[in-house]
Amino acid sequence: MTDLSNMALYRPSRKSDGAIVPQKQANKAPSGVAGPVEGRASTKRNASECARDQTQGWANTMSRLARVRESAVRHRKQSFTALLHHLTPTLLEQSFYQLKRSAAEGVDGISWRQYEEGLENRLADLYQRIHSGRYRPQPARRVHIPKADGSKRPLSILSIEDKVAQQAVATILNQIYETDFLGFSYGFRPQRSQHDALDALAWSITRTRVNWVLDVDIQQFLDAAS
């Protein structure tokens, strides 16, 4: 994701048999309510206005994304070639609050809590860089996690800013992809996990006749260059 200025999506034409799963909203509301200063209204009024603006902004964002999803359902062969305008400051803010507070730091050494300080200015700058084509992701920080068999699993840790950008893009693209995925697809989908897949598998093998089960583990599949 080196340049989002021409973000587009070309999708294959195929029928979906699963419902669209809406993305879970963040548990924590954005902060940053202004305090009382000379020439401004009281804190209580500012808090109310800030909350109302944030709620309205998020509602408008989800309304626009809902129209993208509706279009994806109605026009199965449609190619989406203009999606970047859906990436708004409000979406970036919500994407930030969807991240894990305890997430590991990237190469810049900035934690979630540190990024939250001055969040409005940080996201405004990120928004401008994305829409002007100047945004470039930082290198990922490589770490190795020990495995039970003695080997190590490599992980790439992104910076908080890059996670925010990717989460925002994923939110937009999910409106389209979710209409194409099959009902038995669970990997990396909103509000679905490996536990949901295991529950579905357990339900299937206990209620239908199963002659065989195939378990495939492709060694270092994600590390191999295609």
Image (cartoon, grey):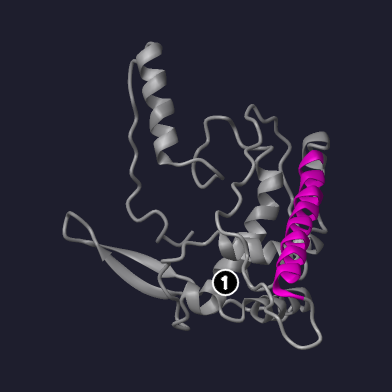
- Mostly what secondary structure, the magenta segment? helix
Say if the magenta span includes residue 69.
Answer: yes
Q: Name the residue under label 1.
A: 162
Query: Residue 201, how many percent across, how many down?
Result: 40, 26
Q: In the image, what residue type sits under mark 1? A: Asp
At 61% from the left edge and 81% from the top edge, which residue is drawn? 118
Figure label count: 1
Q: Can residue 139 be seen in this view?
A: no
At 69% from the left edge and 77% from the top edge, which residue is drawn? 34
State whether residue 130 is above or below residue 85.
below
Instruction: Identify the element where label 1 is drawn.
Output: helix
Magenta-highlighted residues = 42-70
For residue 139, side relative to residue 172 (left or right)? left
Is 149 in front, or is 168?
Answer: 168
At 76% from the left edge and 65% from the top edge, which residue is drawn? 88
Quarter of the picture holding the N terminus: bottom right
Is 65 in front, or is 55?
Answer: 55
Looking at this view, name the residue that lies furthest to the bottom: 38
